[in-house]
């Protein structure tokens, strides 16, 4: 085989792709190692400054002197400004001095408090320093910060994505609000737990820009045109398959509003959009669609197909009764199109257009 033929052969192309994947993997591992060492360095600097201040009675002015001397000693290294050194102190104190942190983690992970401290230290080193500062400044509740720490490390959220998730109250919606589904009845325990993590109790669709009650087709059109934002709101692992996905049974056709595949559940996930409140008959229709998906689209190694009914509002008791006899896993979640403001603030905040005009005025 000539050299030209080798370079264009399928075997060579496959080999080259394997090498590329390996290089990217090595770079990511190296970057993670560098980040881990940097965050640990900042942790230790914050710890040592605090210890010396306590033992020797040094005041806050020593921070400026330390900053000056470190920058002289390491002129090509950034990160030793007075502000960053104070952030290192805050960073260390936020996790070490708050005994509630150890209690929260120990309870959630069923471990002793010393081991829980090791887990916290590991978690903060798995995300970049800028992410840690964002959490330090924006999230005060220990269990909520733990949620964002884990999610950022697990899903690889950028700093902007993390900020968006915090502003959208992702923790409150994912953990504190009640989820309505029949997963424990319709799936093996290990799959039911994973599916529960995948489902949110409610979904924030403010990015659609809709300020009125919307019909199903309008919702669908807007979601498709804002698919990236919708995938971000759904969470990590969702892959879009299609809209108005066609299924046939005999001479009849049926269409699923939105169909996704979840990479970690290895399952098709069907979404039905409802412009109004949940109705019991919605569950029956979804159950029918899932039967068709399992028979006609589900692959050999796939898990059971899952249905999610997105509606404007829901009554949890009604949902519970509607799903009780369904054999397929179905979840019901509400969506909101705009933030709910206190009545005394309604109409008093500037619109997006007004804010845009102010920003343009400042920079013009």
Image (cartoon, helix red, strand yellow):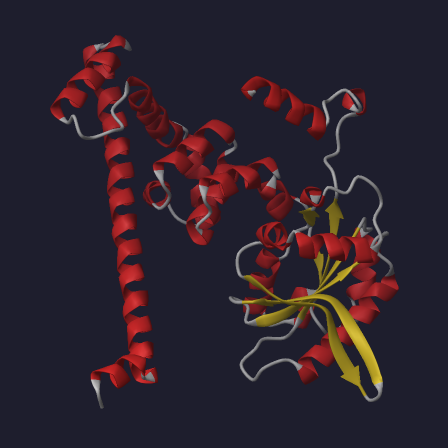
| Coordinates of residue 338 in the picture (x, y in percent) | 74, 38
Foreground residue among 53 and 340 = 340
Left or right of residue 247, residue 76 in this image: left
Q: Quadrant of the N terminus?
A: bottom left
| Residue 59 visible to an observer of this rendering | no
Residue at x-position 58% and y-position 42%? 171
Figure quadrant of residue 130: top left
Residue at x-position 27% and y-position 62%? 23
Foreground residue among 7 and 161 = 7
Is residue 164 placed above or below 90 in the rendered structure? below
Q: Quadrant of the C terminus?
A: top right
Q: How many numbered marks are there?
A: 0
Figure quadrant of residue 261: bottom right
| Coordinates of residue 123 in the picture (x, y in percent) | 37, 45
| Coordinates of residue 324 in the picture (x, y in percent) | 78, 66
| Coordinates of residue 144 in the picture (x, y in percent) | 53, 38
Residue at x-position 68% and y-position 50%? 201
Is residue 328 placed above or below 104 in the rendered structure? below
Foreground residue among 269 and 17 = 17
Left or right of residue 186, residue 314 in this image: right
Residue at x-position 62% and y-position 39%? 168
| Residue 263 visible to an observer of this rendering | yes
Q: Residue furthest left?
A: 73
Is residue 247 placed above or below 319 in the rendered structure? below
């Amino acid at each position: 085989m000539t050299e030209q033929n080798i370079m264009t052969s399928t075997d060579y192309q496959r080999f080259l792709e394997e090498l590329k994947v390996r290089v990217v993997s090595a770079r990511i591992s190296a970057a993670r190692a560098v980040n881990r060492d940097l965050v640990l360095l900042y942790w230790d600097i914050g710890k040592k400054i605090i210890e010396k201040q306590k033992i020797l009675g040094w005041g806050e002015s020593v921070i400026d002197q330390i900053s000056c001397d470190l920058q002289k000693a390491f002129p090509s290294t950034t990160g030793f400004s007075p502000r960053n050194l104070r952030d290192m102190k805050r960073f260390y104190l936020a996790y070490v001095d708050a005994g509630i942190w150890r209690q929260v983690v120990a309870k959630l992970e069923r471990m002793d408090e010393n081991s829980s401290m090791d887990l916290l230290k590991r978690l903060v080193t798995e995300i970049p320093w800028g992410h840690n500062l964002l959490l330090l400044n924006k999230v005060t509740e220990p269990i909520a910060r733990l949620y964002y720490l884990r999610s950022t490390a697990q899903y690889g959220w950028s700093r902007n994505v993390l900020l968006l998730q915090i502003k959208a109250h992702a923790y409150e919606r994912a953990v504190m609000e009640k989820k309505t589904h029949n997963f424990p009845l319709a799936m093996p325990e290990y799959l039911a737990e994973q599916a529960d993590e995948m489902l949110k109790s409610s979904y924030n669709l403010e990015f659609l820009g809709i300020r009125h009650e919307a019909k199903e087709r309008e919702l669908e059109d807007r979601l498709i045109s804002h698919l990236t934002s919708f995938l971000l709101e759904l969470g990590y692992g969702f892959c879009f398959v299609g809209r108005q996905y066609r299924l046939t049974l005999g001479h009849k056709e049926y269409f699923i509003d939105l169909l996704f595949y979840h990479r970690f559940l290895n399952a098709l996930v069907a979404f039905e959009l409802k412009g109004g409140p949940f109705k019991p008959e919605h569950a029956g229709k979804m159950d029918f669609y899932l039967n068709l998906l399992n028979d006609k689209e589900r692959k050999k190694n796939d898990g059971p197909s899952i249905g999610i009914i997105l509606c404007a509002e829901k009554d949890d008791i009604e949902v519970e009764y509607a799903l009780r006899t369904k054999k397929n896993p179905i979840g019901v979640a509400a969506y909101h199109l705009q933030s709910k403001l206190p009545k005394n603030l309604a109409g008093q905040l500037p619109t997006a257009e007004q804010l845009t005009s102010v920003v343009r005025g400042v920079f013009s």
